[in-house]
Image (cartoon, helix red, strand yellow):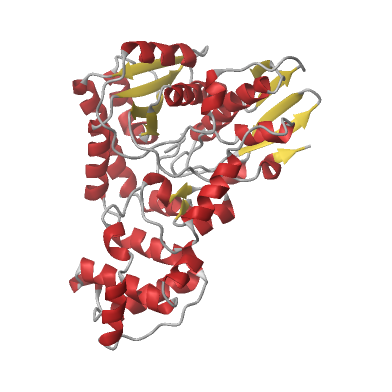
Amino acid sequence: MPTQHCRSRDPWSRFARHILPRPRDCFESRQRGHASLEWHDHDQDQGAIFRSALTVCGHSSRGDMDRRTMLIGAGAAFVTAGSGMIGWHAAAGSMADYDRYAARLRGSLAPPDLQAIVRYATLAASGHNTQPWRFRLDREAIEIRPDFGRRTPVVDPDDHHLYVSLGCAAANLALAAAATGRSGELSIAADGRAVRYDYASGVPRWDALFDAIPKRQCTRAEYDGRAVPAADLAEIERAVATPGVSLALITDRARMNRVRDLVLAGNEDQMRDPAFMRELVQWIRFNPRSAMATGDGLFSAASGNPVLPSGLGRFAFDRLFNVGQENRKYARQIDSSAGIAIFFGERADPGHWIRIGQACQRFALAATHLGLKIAFINQPVEVNRLRADLAAVVGETRRPDLVMRFGYGPALPLSPRRPAASVMQP
């Protein structure tokens, strides 16, 4: 799920403290006679600027460079090259602009037309935030079909996450349509490869989960460790109830530790796979400018990472992203969580994967309504050799479909979305 339905990698937890240069660093660079680099507002030139920065700082080989000196020097070169922070912002964009963009995407359903309903549907979770869906409008019906041009074949070779994403969007769609007086029923196509919402005009029907749609996010941060009241867990389970889907909730530390160890093992397998890493970086948006331009992908700030010009972000990703650091981060995050949810479908086919998505999205919305945060930790379902071990944690033999941690945590910037009009078909 969404392979990281919203799961983003966090290669720069310490990078942020060093890469944004201080004025004194820039001044000292000039005083020491460091070369001034001409700024080019093109991604392909940013990597060259960073490489030049390493030479400027007196490092000609990667083997003996000091990381902190490299980062500060590189940041200073970027600022010098771009005539100060103006150049940096020209490449990376503004978080203030991004926040306004994200707020518009999540504005009220006004006017309450079909495009607004589709807009709310697209606020659902999807693997790598690829948004692999198309909405076809029919007379008193909306159909959601897969957009195979947005597949992620390395992490999701059987399109499991893609179909789960359709189910997530369908759950949002049904809530938004009912809230505008278009109550109806969801049905899955006979071949299991599309979902349809048939509706009739009537009285608007409000649901607390509807209000949670624009607030829901995958919060890839440490939580505060507080336990969730049993009554709240029961309310979430009621909201999730979906034919063909089972939910296992884990709140005891012993089993959570077993899941944590499987997440770390899966993360290591994935990070040592060059194809996985190439696919992942294609979907990372390192700055507001890139996130707003594409309207998709894993926005670095949404997982607490620093905002960087795209070329510098890719350069840093290639050189500073390592298994040990990532696994320590995942361990801290899981250890800080109140619990873990594992979803199982009755069968492993697209129709049941869509149902898994519906249940998963309703779980996330119910948790949001109750003040909880969630994040996907899907490595043990994405790495085939770990699936049986994950299922065994809760006494299951079926293929596990999704893994999610939950708890009380901070709010982070929201993820980008494409315009509703771009995913609609007449």
- Identify the residue at image location x=38%, y=78%: 80
Q: Quadrant of residue 213?
A: top right
In the rendered image, is residue 10 in sight? yes
In the figure, is residue 426 to the left or right of 98?
Answer: right
Residue located farthest toward the bottom when viewing the structure as drawn: 33
In the figure, is residue 147 to the left or right of 114?
Answer: left
Q: Quadrant of residue 66?
A: bottom left
Does residue 177 lie above or below 80 as drawn?
A: above
Q: Quadrant of the C terminus?
A: top right
Does residue 111 lie above or below 48 as drawn?
A: above
State how many labels appear.
Answer: 0
In the rendered image, is residue 397 in sight? no
Where does the image place residue 275, in percent across and percent down from the top left? 41, 51
Where does the image place residue 182, in percent across and percent down from the top left? 72, 20
Q: Quadrant of residue 231?
A: top left
In the figure, is residue 335 to the left or right of 103?
Answer: left
Q: Nearer the viewer, residue 26 or 305?
A: 26
Residue located farthest toward the right when viewing the structure as drawn: 139
Where does the image place residue 224, in percent across and percent down from the top left? 26, 32
Does residue 1 lie above or below 413 as drawn?
A: above
Where does the image place residue 402, in percent across and percent down from the top left? 41, 27
Q: Nearer the viewer, residue 259 or 396?
A: 259
- Identify the residue at image location x=42%, y=38%: 4
- Identify the residue at image location x=41%, y=74%: 84
